[in-house]
Amino acid sequence: MSGHSTSEHAKSPLTTYFAVWGALLLGTWLTYEASLLDLGRYNAAVALIIATTKALLVTLFFMHLKGASEKLLKLVVASTIFFLILLLALSMFDYGTRSFS
Amino acid sequence: MAAHTHHHNPALLHHFSTEEQQRNSASFGMWIFLATEVMFFGGLFCAYLIYRHWYFGDFGAASTSINAKLGGANTAVLICSSLTVVLAIWAAQTSRRALMIGMLVLTMLFGLTFLGIKGIEYADKFHEQHVPGASFSFEHVPIPSHPDQYANPRHAEIFFALYFIMTGLHALHMIIGLGIFSWLLWAAWKGRFTPEYHTPLEIGGLYWHFVDIVWIYLFPLLYLIDRHK
């Protein structure tokens, strides 16, 4: 058991860091190329999905949200996302369904 | 009374019982600050969404006038700077002083490169008279996918106002980040950071990564809309 945890501890996080860096650069290239394709109404969706994937990679691995032991910290992150979505979604439901003529 | 007997890390403040508790409290405070920053930028993203919805074609016309290659290069520069930040923290955790200092310097160089490219972009916009205000001009620019229609300059001006406010506030965050990293570099040089105590590096890193995330959203929303049309 202790041998296992020692080898876990000894494992360098560098592989993860460089893999995330590569994935982020790949995502940047993908989002640029995708913007040149005509995907109809899905262009914005593809751009936002790629951006959110990149943001998740940064928060989970660079900001170490993955493996964070503090439950309070996860609560702060979850409520941040909740209130941001509340702000954006309610505003867009309002403005998107109004007729201003 | 005066002597605590056990080995005491001088960086451990007396109102914390353990180093881990002190570290967790510091990063928890930073995450709460970042939550307020998300709501702060969130209001601007909300304004962007509403106007993009109203002035859909005008925003497309205005966006395609921005140099997306420079924006893409800046995205790559910021991503590289986020890597050098985690490498600096890793170097502190494994007592590699030279690597830590080198990575902090590289982070700042990437940050300065970002601001330099941003400056080139802003200069282009000044020359093209795309800065909102008295000299703003956006006449006879066709709307993407509707070449027979011109964009409404007043609506395009809203796009450029949002572009300058959002990228400008982001650049201000970069400048503050450079200030924070100057201090971190000085403290690292002085030997303040050890494998046991390098909380300022982690907190500064959280800030830097957050600024990177804001840019990850700004890039497609401001630079890449309607380019395929």
Image (cartoon, coloured by chain):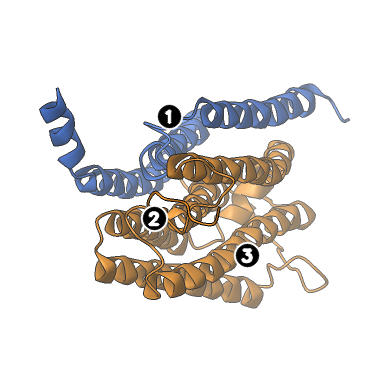
Q: What residue sits 72% from the left and 30% below the top? A: A87
Q: In the image, what residue type sits under mark 1? A: Ser
Residue drawn at the location 41% of the way across and 67% of the way down: B192
Chain identity of mark 1:
A
- The residue under the point 38% across, 60% down is B81
Query: To which residue does mark 1 refer?
Result: A69
In the image, farthest residue toward the right: A101
Image mark for residue B172: 3
- The chain coloured blue is A
Pick the front one: A58 or B89? B89
Classify mark 3: residues with Cα within 10 Å, few (<14), some (14-19) or many (20+).
few
First-in-chain label (3 vs 2): 2
Which type of secondary structure does the marked residue at label 1 adopt?
loop
Residue B82 numbered mark, or none: 2
Q: Residue B145: which disc?
A: none
Q: Residue at x 40, y 73 (%)?
A: B109
